[in-house]
Image: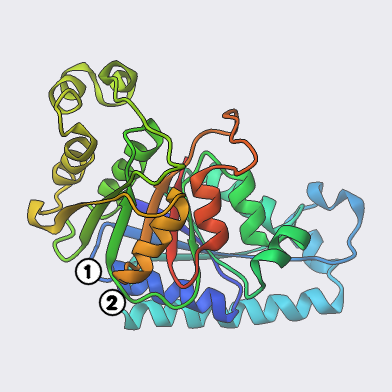
Amino acid sequence: MEKRILVAVDGSTYSNNTIHYLGTLFGPQEAVRMHLLSIIPCGSMPPEKEWMEELELLNSLPPEARKRLRSAKTYMKNATDKLGRLGINPERITTEIKLARRSVAEDIIDEARRGLFDALVIGRRGITRLEELIIGSVSETIFKKCHDVPVWIIDGRVDSRTFLVPIDGSFSSMMAADHLAHIIEDCRHCQVTLFHSSAMLASATNIEPSDFYAKWGREWCEEHMSRPDSLFHAPRQLLVEGGIPAENIKWLHSSKGIEAGRQILRQALIDDYGTIVIGRRGEEVRKGIFKGVSDRVVLMGDRVAIWVVG
């Protein structure tokens, strides 16, 4: 099955890290297709620019925007060439450069939704986490507003092709495992660890198979989610059915620490996991003063790729 990934690029070092990560991870996977998108801020443009045709916008561009547009064409070619060197042939890549209609973040989200992409990939800018909280960033805005398309945030240069999947028996954690199974379908070299933290502040989840019928069907849920070891077995089964060799999937449980988010990041650092795949609850769920585990993992994550699945 073809997988379509939307990749936001801007020619920065952080964007180059994203390209490196995708090429390293998906070079051998022919079913993965990438659409590279660059949104060019237009600066001081007429307020009716949302309704202007692209050619009208081009003719109205201020000098600085024209310069950005020329640069975008150059770094888009460089990104395509780099992916080619990493084993992704041109037939698997499409590119698009668009002028911003609203904001860079909102236009990227609109494209991800409109194009029905399997994932949206962004590189985290080189600003501190505190600065992100105060002044915001494109990656922070996309993470906060885009709940209906899985968002992958790449922080730094990531070479490892190992995955850490936090599991707690919730629907959101099962969706994370399902997303991973779909994306790396039949990947023989990928190593996956299903990780459960029973840290003091981690919330316990009782698995009720009927809660999952709508997604995976009654028969599957009763078979795989009614066992004593369902916390591990059910997500493992999703991965196995996705073509991941059973011997490439392991289970890890930790009871150290007092907060699950920190334990997840600690484990990723200790064992050099390249990617954390984590589910997050919907916007309607009250998360309290400490927010959700996925929020904290994204906030504190460093030199790791984080896939957040809503």
Q: Which residue is drawn at 24% across and 55% down?
A: 193
Question: Where's residue 34, x and y in %?
Answer: 41, 62
Under circle 1, the secondary element is loop
Residue 272 shows which numbered tag? Answer: none
Q: Residue at x 54, y 62 (%)?
A: 300
Q: Quadrant of residue 288?
A: top right
| Relative vertical location of residue 93 with respect to residue 211 in this rendering, above or below | below
In the displayed structure, does residue 163 sit left or right of residue 147?
left
User: Which of the two residues, 56 or 189, is positioned nearer the viewer here?
Assistant: 189
Residue 87 shows which numbered tag? Answer: 2
Q: Three-letter amino acid code at disc 2?
A: Gly
Distance from disc 2 to disc 1, alpha carbons, whole Å, reads: 7 Å
Q: Name the residue under label 1.
A: 28
Scheme of colours in the image: rainbow
Q: In which quarter of the image is residue 12?
A: bottom right
- CB of mark 2 within 8 Å of CB of mark 1? yes
Circle 2 residues within 10 Å: few <14, some 14–19, many ≥20: some
Question: Where's residue 273, x and y in %?
Answer: 32, 67
User: Which of the two residues, 114 or 91, is positioned nearer the viewer here?
Assistant: 114
Under circle 2, the secondary element is loop
Q: Three-letter amino acid code at disc 1?
A: Pro
In the displayed structure, does residue 152 sit left or right of residue 86?
right
Circle 1 residues within 10 Å: few <14, some 14–19, many ≥20: some
Question: Where's residue 203, x and y in %?
Answer: 43, 35
